Image (cartoon, rainbow, N blue to C red):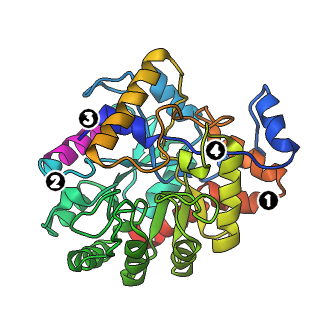
Amino acid sequence: MPDRRSFLIHSALAGAGALAGGWAGALRAAAPPLRWAPYAEAMVVDACGFIGSDEAKPGDLLSPKLLAEARESGLRVLQTTVGPVAQYEGAFEATVRDIAAWENEIALHPDTFLAVRSGADLERARREKKLGVVYQFQDSAPIGEKLERIDDYHRLGLRTVQLTYNVRNLAGDGCLEPGDAGLSKFGHSLVERLNERRILVDLAHSGRRTALEAIAASKSPVLISHTGCAALVERPRNKTDAELRACAQRGGVVGIYLMPFLRESGQPGAADVIRHLEHALDVCGEDHVGIGTDNLVSAVALTESYKRDHAESIRERRKLGISAPGESETVYLYVEGLNAPRRFETLAALLSARGHSDARIGKILGGNFARVMNEVWG
């Protein structure tokens, strides 16, 4: 598997495209950042994001710059990945190390971070203007065959589990499996145990049958923390209207990501993010749509070393069989118009300019995710 640095680089692949109308061109031409007046008090949730740098080495502490950008972002909750993906051997130990590293950062910077374990912690983070950190898995591999590990991870702070990454695992098929065999018998047991422990089930990266079967199996609302709309761009990582609708009908929330899969080709742009958000709103309703960037919080600097690392990471993922169609060595990990820590406020301003109400925008920025998190976690 790629090292943690490569995984973080890849997890921030951005999505883009172009919408008709003059507002997209105005965005590219605008010099000052766009503002949305209610942003300072909003519940802003990134359902899948990362704090780090492509220049960081394993074991490095977060730099003052990264900490400042985390505060500048205005995010109140960040679901961030702990543990490896598509890897069983050593996964438990790697996960414990990741959690320990984050616990250390939270202890070192109580003015910036707050560990989120319950719905009350979400509101505390918003009220105190801190960044609440939620631990999530992007693969159930760290659980292995031992369902009792879920209890251990819960005590360590885990609150969301994505059942599969791109490939098949013990729980079911990921989005790159051509057979799309769905949720396994073990996967049904896993969903049941997660429900019992009040841990959220996440269906990003899952195969389409896996997603529909897990939504039906779960007694609690589920998340699709980071995805796009297959009706707009047919890619394995994007969800069909049937999946989006099923998630919403059972009370869950769908997060639109900032990934290259939001357009057929080319460098991502903010207009495509809006286009997919608006399609998800049409399918799911305004109470069931949010944002899961799958990005680093910090802006990307397009240095030559960054470009080399990016291309190398893509090649390594292809070699390992976990690279999804649409990943490109020349599409970099940022979204035009949103390459800044405060990108959620820019998105809010763009949605406002499109005629969406402040109440609806507040739900999309994080109110919907916070509602479901509060319901499931208690």
- Answer with mark 3 or mark 1, whichever residue precedes in sequence: 3
Magenta segment, which residues? Answer: 93-106
Helix, strand or loop under label 4: loop
Please report contact status of discs 3 and 2: CB closer than 8 Å, yes or no.
Answer: no
* Rendered location of residue 88, percent (x, y): 16, 53
Q: Are marks 2 and 4 in contact (CB under 8 Å)?
A: no
Between marks 4 and 3, how big is the CA–CA gap? 27 Å
What residue is disc 2 on? Answer: 88
Which sits earlier in the primary sequence, circle 1 or circle 4?
4
Instruction: Determine which residue is flagged by label 4.
Output: 16
Q: Residue at x 25, y 47 (%)?
A: 84
The quadrant of the image that shows the C terminus is: bottom left
Residue under label 3, please give it. Answer: 3
Q: Position of residue 59 (x, y in %)?
A: 25, 27
**Residue depth check, mark 3 versus mark 1: number of the one nearer the observer:** 3
Q: Nearer the N terminus, badge 2 or badge 4?
A: 4
Neighbor class of circle 3 (other Cα within 10 Å; few <14, some 14-19, many 20+) is few
Mark-to-mark CA distance, 2 and 1: 44 Å
Q: Residues within 10 Å of mark 4 (few under 14, many from 20)?
A: many
Give the secondary structure at mark 3. loop
Q: Earlier in the sequence, mark 3 or mark 2?
A: 3
Between label 4 and label 3, give the one nearer the viewer. Answer: 4
Tell me which secondary structure the magenta stretch mostly adopts.
helix
Per the image, the residue denoted by label 1 is 356
Furthest residue to the right? 22
Q: Amino acid at mark 2?
A: Tyr
